Amino acid sequence: MSQRKGSDGNVRPSYHRLTVKEVREETAEARSFVLVPERFVSPDDPASRPTADDSTSAPNALVENFRITLDGEDHTVPIAAGETLLQAALAAGIDAPYSCTEGHCGTCMSWLRNGDVSMTSTQALSKRDIERGWVLACQSRPSSPAPIWLDFDI
């Protein structure tokens, strides 16, 4: 698109028709671009590093499985030592919502109806969210032998 001045002195766009060759060249050029997903955190984000009290350093055989409610269906999900609730759900073939897996976006936010979990990062949650029982599935690991029930439908 080029520009030209109109009779009133204002600049107006000037269009020209593309030839088939120009369309093919533009299409080929557009196909050469690569989209790269945006990262929410830097690789040296201290919140994403395991800490000494992180439950990944100790076995969490506190529970063998937990319950998830998603899209109106209840699922019993096995969980291995060191796994987050989200990792276990995905490994079991459950299409749980998530995006960053680092506790920053809040996409995996769910309601902990029963049980106790510890979260490595809670940046996507307010103190009030946590008090009301909201957790980030990507950061939650069992912290007691109490049965866990995670509800994504609320």
Image (cartoon, grey):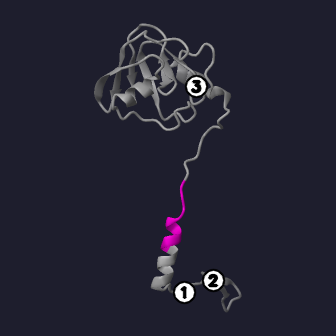
Q: Is residue 153 left or right of residue 141?
A: left
In the depicted view, which residue is nearer to us: 143 or 34? 34
Residue on which the image places disc 2: 2
**Residue 153 visible at all:** no
Between the residue at mark 2 and the residue at mark 3, the CA separation in whole angstroms equals 51 Å
Residue type of the residue flagged with mark 2 = Ser
Mark 2 near mark 1, Cβ–Cβ under 8 Å?
yes
Percent position (x, y) of residue 16? 54, 86
Spatial separation of the CA atoms under disc 1 and disc 3: 54 Å
Residue at mark 2 to residue at mark 1: CA–CA distance? 8 Å
- Determine which of the numbered discs, if any, sits on residue 56 in the image: none
Q: Residue at x 50, y 86 (%)?
A: 17
Residue drawn at the location 64% of the way across and 27% of the way down: 47
Name the element at disc 2: strand
Residue at mark 3: 122
* 134 and 48: which is toward the camera: 48
Residue 33 lies within the magenta run: yes
